[in-house]
Image (cartoon, rainbow, N blue to C red):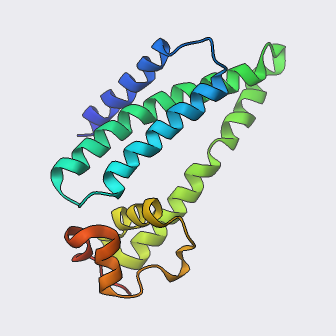
Amino acid sequence: MALAGGILVAAGSAAAAILPTRMRAATMYMIVALVNSATLCVCGWTTATVEPTTLGVTLYLFTIGTCYAMFTAVVLEFLGHSGKSGSGRYSIINSLGNVPVQYMLLLDGWGGDKWAAAGWPASRRWWVRSGSDPAGVFPDREAQELACGRGCGAGLRAR
């Protein structure tokens, strides 16, 4: 499965080459990121069954590859002709792009700590659906099933 995921990400990165270049890279990156967010809604707003999850993950991997390529385009557009300091400046700007990755890792870890193995998808579904503060999430089993569907709510155990 990891190979198939890698191929989907690579295909998404290659697909970024056919996007129109008349727009600024930042605008195209925003559009691609919104499409990527919409693919997460496929997983977040459907039940936790095989078909919607497979479709959502497939679309997500393809669009995240496109996001990677567009992020690189934004950084390179921002740098312009940078001369000898280009590699250092690229590294600094590129590292700032990892801040959202860090807070998503923290969210995933929080979900795993709170609900064990079922916590990662449950915390992602909750994040997509609520957009609110995670402190008081899922106060009872009914709230778990409402947010995650009956399929994943059954596997959640609050600690």
* Relative to 7, 17 lies left or right: right
Percent from the top left, x then y, of residue 40? Answer: 39, 48
Q: Considering only vertical position in the picture, is 80 above or below 31?
A: above
**In which quadrant of the rendered view does residue 29 lie?**
top right
Q: Nearer the viewer, residue 53 or 46?
A: 46
List x then y, in percent, for residue 18: 46, 12
Residue at point 33% right, 58% down? 45
Residue 5: horizontal and vertical position, in percent?
30, 36
Q: Residue at x 42, y 19 (%)?
A: 15
Vertical comparison of 142 with 38: above or below: below
> As rendered, which of 86 and 5 lies closer to the eye?
5
Q: Is residue 139 above or below residue 128?
A: below
* Residue 71 x, y percent position in the rendering: 60, 30
In the image, 141: left or right of 72? left
Specify whether 13 is left or right of 140.
right
Q: Is residue 33 left or right of residue 3?
A: right
The residue shown at (44%, 30%) is: 65
Q: Quadrant of residue 1?
A: top left
| Quadrant occupied by the C terminus | bottom left
Give the residue displayed 22% in from the left and 45% down from the top: 54
Looking at the rendered structure, the number of numbered marks drawn on it comes to 0
